[in-house]
Amino acid sequence: MIARILTAIGLLAVAPALWAAGAIEGEVQRQPLNTSAIVMFLAFVGATLYITYWASKRNSSTSDFYTAGGSITGFQNGLAIAGDYMSAASFLGISALVFSSGYDGLIYSIGFLVGWPVILFLIAERLRNLGKYTFADVASYRLGQTQIRTLSASGSLVVVAFYLIAQMVGAGKLIQLLFGLDYHIAVILVGILMVLYVLFGGMLATTWVQIIKAVLLLSGASFMALMVMKHVDFDFARLFTEAIAVHPKGEAIMSPGGLVKDPISAISLGLALMFGTAGLPHILMRFFTVSDAKEARKSVFYATGFIGYFYILTFIIGFGAILLVSTNPAFKDAAGALLGGNNMAAIHLANAVGGSWFLGFISAVAFATILAVVSGLTLAGASAVSHDLYASVFKKGKANEKDELRVSKITTVCLGVLAIFLGIAFEKQNIAFMVGLAFSIAASCNFPVLFLSMYWKNLSTRGAMIGGWLGLITAVTLMILGPTVWVQVLGNAEAIFPYEYPALFSMAVAFAGIWFFSVTDKSVAAGDARARFIPQFVRSQTGLGASGATAH
Amino acid sequence: MHDDMYRRIQASPHFQELVSKRERFAWILSAIMLGLYVAFILLIAFVPELLGARISPDSPTTWGIPIGVGVILSAFVLTGVYVQRANGEFDTMNQAILDEVQK
């Protein structure tokens, strides 16, 4: 038992990126059947399927399918972006980290947040003004369509695949923990529901599923934080005093612990989080669902607010769990460990402050969260295949809309089947590194190409190609040689690459590669790409010629 | 199709002014955000005891709490500041430029 807790704590310590969007890690115990949670979850599924039906009647063109016709408002999109970020793992994982180590939980949540302002300042409006459906539209704007779309689509699909595996395995573990149902049921259920949302409802349904979930999660978490604060008469000093008194680490929970080991790792992680977010295809595509740059900016403002608020809530919830859960023998087993592991801290707290129906509500919301995130991922993967690979690379931009839409729907079904298959195949695997890897790849391949295509006049197709692939390969190689895969997954004694997060190095390789192979590119195509920078620059700044909202 | 218009906009002094103003503002705000975050990480890495020090001897609250929450709030405030100016002043300038070339 003690060994299992130590493993769980160890996993938390090595895989912080996991919490942002990844999976529930380690061994989980199957819990008794939780009827109220299942009833609440069925209500959520019913409501979202109704929305999908409603959305399906408005879903006829590719623009509807990929971007909800650009009809989402900044506020709605802000909620949806926040929803993509507030995954089950970040809710349960960060509150569990606060529960076990106190202040360290706050440190990590800050790392996840600070990327957003930078995305707003440097990327959001240019992205909206240049793109139509996918970020590859922007990256390939003045470069060779075939090469850059293939690179971007590959980058997207790799990121989507790793992220999907982590989410599917997380869904399976979570359903054992929360509902007391079988792992395979969860994986198949998630696979089928996400295909239904995306297939029939497209982006409109996917966005609304995300919005509903975000509202439910924020209200549930607010209620829990409120009840915790009520317990201590809304006095933070009392909250901290009582927590220090009952926590085994005592006063150490109020200061940074050992989670940030050295500055290189910390900065590398920070880079992966900050710029990885700016290269995640399912986040970037949300910028095309609003009507113009004005709304795109507003979405980031609201998203930053909601995400920041959510992280402050999880901090209070973690401390609340120290007070109300760790002191209550009903939530512990004979050895004094939390039932179901530390990741259950927030769930037990829901029971402590709101009773069994509220427990059911929070469990259902946690599971709904996974559904909403995988739907967004599936849509991002489907658009990379149909819009970038099929319509632009395979058909050279001459595909008709009907065929493109059909390809995206076929891809959606394929991704659903693949996700179920991978979810089952990876059930017993250590997948802790996957979300970290997804962030690192996004930061080292998608982001440099996207960023330089908007900012650097001399970027050439050859430079973007070689540099982008180098970034991707370096990120994957260093991750495999690093402690997370080489030692923990492959069981070697010593890591060849000493740092957990390769982003600092792989981003440097990507940028250096793109720079070198662009400035040495004297071809005619490179000259053309430079000449097209001015029109692109003016469009990115003014929005003239940008694809607008389609009227219904 | 817009190529001619793009060149005219590019040549416009108003456009140059908008771009340099907005770029400078965006880079300054990015530098502030990155600076705050890097400073926070360096504090954790080199002087963790500072963040663990109590604000006052009779309160359990350590300096790390207001500093951490402060970084979260500053992210929100900085985005707010940018959106306020970009959606107001900059968009007005932008619209004027577009009106000018489309006359």
Image (cartoon, rainbow, N blue to C red):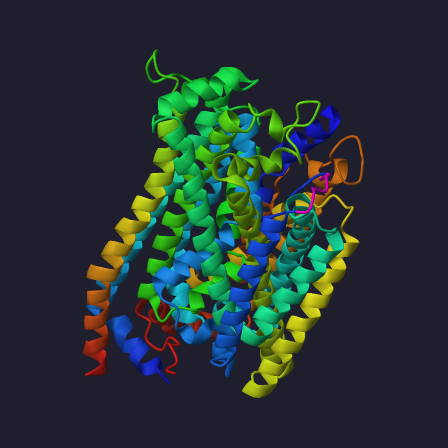
Task: Name the side, left or right, on which A72 lies relative to A510.
Answer: left
Of residue A370 and residue A466, the one placed in the foreground of this image is A370
- The tally of labels here is 0
Q: Is residue B60 above or below residue B23?
A: above
Residue B5 visible? The answer is yes
Q: Quadrant of residue A370?
A: bottom right
Of residue A426 and residue A516, the one placed in the foreground of this image is A426
- State the image coordinates of residue B30 (x, y, percent, origin top left): 36, 46
- Is residue A118 located in the magenta-colored stretch of the structure? no
Q: Start and end of the magenta stretch?
A: A27-33
Task: Name the side, left or right, on which A437 lies relative to B45.
Answer: right
Quadrant of image for the C terminus of chain A: bottom left
Of residue A447 and residue A350, the one placed in the foreground of this image is A350
- State the image coordinates of residue A451 (x, y, percent, origin top left): 47, 58
Quadrant of image for the N terminus of chain A: top right
Q: Residue furthest top?
A: B57
Which residue does the image show at 61% across and 30% down from the upper left?
A331
Q: Main secondary structure of the magenta part?
A: loop
- State the image coordinates of residue A211 (x, y, percent, origin top left): 45, 60
Q: Is residue A348 above or below residue A507?
A: above
Q: Is residue A542 above or below residue A304?
A: below
Q: Quadrant of residue A185?
A: bottom right
Residue A149 visible? The answer is no
- State the image coordinates of residue A59 (x, y, percent, origin top left): 50, 80
- Is residue A31 located in the magenta-colored stretch of the structure? yes
